[in-house]
Each structure stands twice: as structure tokens, then as C-alpha cells.
């Protein structure tokens, strides 16, 4: 590791349980293998250890973090450590009274997900009636003067309504709008055929998002995250492996990213057995893809190797079978056809949207 | 692009979504907001500490000129550019 590897953000995935069944959920597909195993005291200890390592941001995430009955206590603990705490939620199940308690406990901001601008479509993608409740929660957040981010995951079944989605965000007076194209891993990879947009669909949406970004400057921060299937160069996934982020799963595994525990051959430590300091500095799994020693060509001699760090290790593994390969999203990858073939297939019109596979507990 | 510079009468204040705190690891101030942080140099930190929504930019510039003993004209350009950038990003707001 280098002196530049500095933890800024702890992502606490408090539980993988969730009332929604989103077809692009970023949780691993073997949810049942990672039950909730950490107590309130465990999480508070992890927060303190992360702060000691330098973390300033805390994402309280999941699954649905509201399902933790001790969330108020966890927020208060984060507040005592001076974290900027961000609750990343579906908005279910929540009452206004509980949101007041979370605010009083010191919560810094709230991110609510919405699946579409139309109730029936939003509920269809979420696999559950939830649209109206989400809007209600967004309104409560603003009424309580908490900063509100609206997150909408984009794909070919909602990209055509990006203008309506932006208008809805404006009517809710959100502070920040994340228009994030689906990252095709985990559940989203299983649904890729139904979700991956065509070039034309993406280009039209991009124009609308860009205009909104300029128009709303200073009022709403609009982010439009391109899908790496169309970018020709990979994303700097997590700003580099073990560089800025550390994620803890519901069962206590400390990971460099959301799906690192799906990579074979890496032994991730549990926060119940080792401190975050030991894990960050000494764990072999965190060291595995730090720096450049692990890189194959074309990464090794690429001038972008310190910009994108070879892309996403999980995408490399789930598409090519080897986590140490160049991310196939890169146009220079010898296996880029895995991406370009999927992209070519997505140019065909889908008169009837393909069926969707919902997130579910598989035993 | 907004070429406009803010008026010297404008009273900037930190947006509610931000949190200004010291980063113990670097010894620098950092402006935190959802998912991100802006590490500040000493001038940037000094500017933001004065952005309380009470004082206009003209007073902020005078106070900084005294604190840093720098040329008020150069400082004015630096402060106005910095403040406009943060207004555009919604990290600063104009107080009524």
C-alpha cells in the first residue's frame, strides 16, 4: 500500500434484508449466506475504528438499513464520532416520527431511491408497491430540513422518461439527483438483456441530463453516471481497490467493495476477529489488487493505470472468470467482445420488454 | 458557463447539506457533503469560516486581508472566484 491509500468512507451494509426486490440490486445473489451477525456494540466499535483510520463519511446502507431496530443508536454513535452520515434507503418501512428521531440523533443526510417517475413502473421494477411511500418520505426529509438526495437507477425501461424523472426531482426540491446507469453485476447482470439500453436511448437521455445539470446549477446537483458498457474505458471502481473505501457486510466481512466477497481465492477478515486498522494495513485480500504489481497487460503499461486502476475486479471476474484480468469494459481488453457483443444485442428494439428476474432469497 | 462574479453585497453561507470540519489525518479543513469532500487550503478554510450568512463578501475580504496580510485586490479576485465556484456547486448559498 502507498501513503495515498487513505480511508475516507465507511460503507456499513447493516443488513441485506429489504422489503423491495429490485431487479438490479447490487447486493450479492447469495443473500442468505450473509445474515445479520453484528450487534449494536459491534457496529459502534467498527465506526470508531473507521474514524481512527481517518474515515469522515459513513454510508448507512443495506439492504434496507431501516430494518435495523437500533438505527437511531447507530446514527447517534456516528454523530458522536463527527461523521457525515448518509442514510441510503428505499424509504420503507418508515414513519415521520422515526425520521424525526433519526434527525435528532444527528443524521447528516438522506438518500431515497426511486425506480421511475410513474408509480406503476417504479413499483414493477421494485417488485413491490412503494412509489407513493417513497414520495412521502422524500417530502418528510425536506420538511425536516435534512439534505435530500434522490437516486434513480437508469436502464432501457426508464431512460425514455428521464425528463419526467428530473421534473419530479425538481418538484420534490431535492438537493442532489443521482441518475446512475445500472452497473451490470449481481442481479443486474442476470437482467442485463432487459435493462441494457441502446446507444440511441442513452444518447437522448444524456442530452436531457446535461441540459438539466446546467439549468439547475446551484440549486440541484445533477449527476449522470454513464454505463461503462458505453464508455470504452473502465470506471475507477471505488476510486481504486482499498484506496478510499471500506465496506462491512451484515455478517462482518470487511471488503474493498460491494461484491468483493464473490471473488474466489480471497480470504476476507471479519470485524469480529480483527480490527479495521489491522485489516486495512495488513490483510492479504486488501493488498491483492492495490498498486500495479497485480496488473496484466494492457493495464501494466497503460498511461491510464493510475486513473482507472484497471477497472472493476468484480466485473473482470464475473465476465471473464478471472478477477486479475483487465476489466472487459475497457476497449483495450482482449476480452472486450464480452461487452461489445452485449452492447450490439442491445441495439435491437424490444417491442415487448423482456421478463425480469426479481431479487429473492435463494437457499 | 457563468462568467458572473458574485456581488460584494452578497452574504454567503454554507449550504445545509455541508459540514465543515478538521481532517485530523491531513491537518486541513474539509468541506463534507453527500458522498464527497473538498479538502481546503488555509485560505479556502478561512473564507468558509467567515461565510456565516451575516457578513457581506466585502467584509469577508477585508477581514482576510488583515489576517493574511495580503494585497486586497489579489485577495478579492481569489475570494470571488472561490465563492462563485461553490455557489455554482450548491455548497454555498446567498443569505437573504
Image: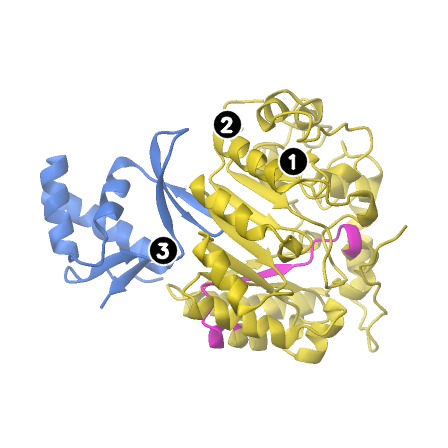
Chain colours: A yellow, B blue
Residue hosting label 1: A256
Residue contact between numbered discs 2 and 1, judged by CB atoms under 8 Å? no
Q: Nearer the viewer, residue A240 or A345?
A: A240
Residue at the image position 46 percent from the left and 43 percent from the top: A83
Task: Check disc 2 and report its element: helix, strand or loop.
Answer: loop
The label number, if any, that marks residue B91 in the structure image: 3
Q: Is residue A300 above or below residue A130?
A: above
Magenta segment range?
A169-187
List the residue tagged with mark 2.
A4
| Quadrant (top left, top right, bottom left, bottom right) of the N terminus of chain A | top right
The mark nearer the N terminus, 2 or 1, is 2
Q: Secondary structure at mark 1?
A: loop
Magenta span has A185? yes
Residue A278 image offset from top left, x and y in percent: 61, 22
The residue drawn where x is 73% and y is 38% is A260
For the point 45% across and 64% down, the residue is: A175
Amino acid at each position: 500500500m502507498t501513503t495515498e491509500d487513505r480511508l475516507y468512507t465507511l460503507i456499513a451494509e447493516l443488513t441485506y434484508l429489504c422489503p423491495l426486490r429490485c431487479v438490479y440490486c447490487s447486493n450479492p445473489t447469495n443473500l442468505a449466506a450473509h445474515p445479520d451477525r453484528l450487534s449494536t456494540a459491534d457496529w459502534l466499535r467498527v465506526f470508531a475504528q473507521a474514524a481512527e483510520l481517518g474515515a469522515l463519511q459513513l454510508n448507512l446502507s443495506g439492504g434496507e438499513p431501516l430494518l435495523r431496530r437500533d438505527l437511531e443508536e447507530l446514527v447517534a454513535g456516528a454523530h458522536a464520532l463527527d461523521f457525515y452520515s448518509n442514510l441510503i434507503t428505499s424509504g420503507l418501512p418508515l414513519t415521520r416520527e422515526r425520521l424525526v428521531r433519526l434527525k435528532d440523533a444527528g443524521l447528516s443526510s438522506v438518500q431515497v431511491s426511486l425506480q421511475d417517475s410513474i408509480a406503476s413502473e417504479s413499483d414493477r421494477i421494485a417488485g413491490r408497491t412503494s412509489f407513493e411511500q417513497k414520495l412521502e418520505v422524500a417530502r418528510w426529509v425536506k420538511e425536516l430540513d435534512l439534505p435530500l438526495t434522490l437516486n434513480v437507477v437508469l436502464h432501457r425501461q426508464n431512460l425514455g422518461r428521464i425528463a419526467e424523472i428530473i421534473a419530479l426531482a425538481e418538484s420534490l426540491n431535492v438537493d442532489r439527483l443521482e441518475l446512475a446507469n445500472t452497473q451490470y453485476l449481481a442481479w443486474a447482470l442476470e437482467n442485463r438483456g432487459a435493462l441494457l439500453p441502446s446507444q440511441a436511448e442513452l444518447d437522448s437521455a444524456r442530452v436531457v441530463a446535461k441540459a438539466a445539470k446546467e439549468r439547475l446549477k446551484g440549486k440541484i446537483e445533477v449527476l449522470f453516471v454513464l454505463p461503462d458498457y458505453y464508455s470504452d474505458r473502465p470506471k475507477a471502481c471505488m476510486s481504486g481497490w482499498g484506496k478510499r473505501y471500506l465496506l462491512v457486510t451484515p455478517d462482518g466481512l470487511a471488503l474493498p467493495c460491494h461484491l468483493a466477497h464473490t471473488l474466489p481465492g480471497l480470504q476476507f477478515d471479519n470485524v469480529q476477529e480483527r480490527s479495521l486498522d489491522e485489516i486495512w494495513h495488513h490483510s492479504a485480500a486488501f493488498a491483492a489488487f492495490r498498486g500495479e504489481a497485480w496488473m496484466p497487460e494492457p493495464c501494466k503499461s497503460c498511461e491510464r493505470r493510475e486513473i482507472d486502476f484497471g477497472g472493476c475486479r468484480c466485473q473482470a471476474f464475473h465476465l471473464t472468470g478471472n478477477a486479475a484480468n483487465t476489466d472487459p469494459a475497457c476497449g483495450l481488453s482482449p476480452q472486450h467482445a464480452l461487452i461489445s457483443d452485449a452492447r450490439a444485442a442491445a441495439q435491437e428494439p424490444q417491442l415487448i420488454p423482456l421478463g425480469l428476474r426479481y431479487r429473492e432469497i435463494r437457499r | 458557463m457563468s462568467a458572473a462574479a458574485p456581488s460584494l453585497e452578497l452574504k454567503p453561507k454554507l449550504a445545509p447539506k455541508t459540514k465543515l470540519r478538521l481532517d485530523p489525518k491531513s491537518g486541513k479543513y474539509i468541506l463534507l457533503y453527500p458522498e464527497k469532500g473538498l479538502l481546503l487550503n488555509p485560505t479556502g478554510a478561512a473564507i468558509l469560516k467567515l461565510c456565516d450568512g451575516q457578513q457581506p463578501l466585502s467584509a469577508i475580504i477585508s477581514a482576510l486581508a488583515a489576517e493574511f496580510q495580503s494585497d486586497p485586490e489579489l485577495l478579492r479576485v481569489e475570494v470571488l472566484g472561490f465563492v462563485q465556484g461553490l455557489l455554482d456547486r450548491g455548497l454555498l448559498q446567498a443569505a437573504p
